[in-house]
Amino acid sequence: MSKPWSEVDLDGSALVVVDAQAGFDDPWWGTRNNPDCDRHIAALVTEWARTGRPLVYVRHDSDSPDSPLHPSRPGNELKPYLEPEPDLLVTKQVNSAFHGTPDLHAWLQLNAIQGLVVCGITTNHCCETTARVGGNLGYQVLFALDATHTFDRTGPDDRSLTADQLATATAVNLHGEFAHVTSTAELLAESRRGTGPRTGA
């Protein structure tokens, strides 16, 4: 279970920016939600850099030659707003940022970091998976839902869900068990007050 907000220390939390890569702007992925996602990620990155808090970027190096995220393609590059130098760059080929190189869990432990703020792309795949694994490993996870986006998906029975529906499902799946689901505005407000989020905020 995630801790109440009154017990979360933003100063001891790393911002983990998952797969904010140019390739996700490719029409190949289909219809997306949340056009404000990039602006919100950029705001969180700027705030973490300003305050000197730990900053982690994660890059997905797809092993599929057809993917816009394949290392041979320009879409593999991180988005331009990830200009501040990260404390750690993790590369991966699976969903979880904890299953990449270098070892994110080992680095967090070495630096005595107990909290994570997760944002990035996509909401219900790599961001949700990273939050789940982080929660299972004992980290206090804040999930910045509006600093993520995803795409419409069709299941094996040909039933389709919109990107907004999938994002809502992620929020329901995570909140109160793997993470505390929050917003960019709330995180920025609490950061500028110099405190962690508060219960009931």
Image (cartoon, rainbow, N blue to C red):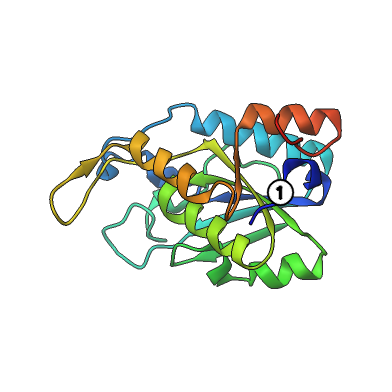
* The N terminus lies in quadrant: bottom right
- Percent of width and height locating residue 137: 64, 68
Tell me what residue is drawn at x 61 percent, y 42 percent.
Answer: 82
- Percent of width and height locating residue 84: 70, 43
**Residue that label 1 marks:** 85
Tell me what residue is drawn at x 57 percent, y 67 percent.
Answer: 98
Image side of residue 81 versus residue 198, left or right? left
* Residue farthest to the left, as pictured: 158
Name the one closer to the observer, 36 or 162. 162
For the residue labelled by badge 1, is the local secondary structure a helix, a strand or a loop? loop
Image side of residue 113 versus residue 121, left or right? right
Image side of residue 54 versus residue 121, left or right? right
Amino acid marked by disc 1: Glu
Name the one closer to the observer, 171 or 31. 171
- Percent of width and height locating residue 59: 52, 57
* The C terminus lies in quadrant: top right
Q: Mark 1 packing: few (<14 Cα in 10 Å), some, or many (20+)? A: few
Relative height, residue 144 to residue 155 (above, below):
above
Relative height, residue 67 to residue 7 (above, below):
below
Image side of residue 132 versus residue 47, left or right? left
Q: Is residue 122 visible to us here?
A: no
Number of marks in the rendered image: 1
Relative height, residue 70 to residue 200 (above, below):
below
* Residue farthest to the right, as pictured: 194
Name the one closer to the observer, 67 or 107. 107
Tell me what residue is drawn at x 79 percent, y 41 percent.
Answer: 6
- Percent of width and height locating residue 200: 70, 31
Q: Is residue 31 visible to us here?
A: yes
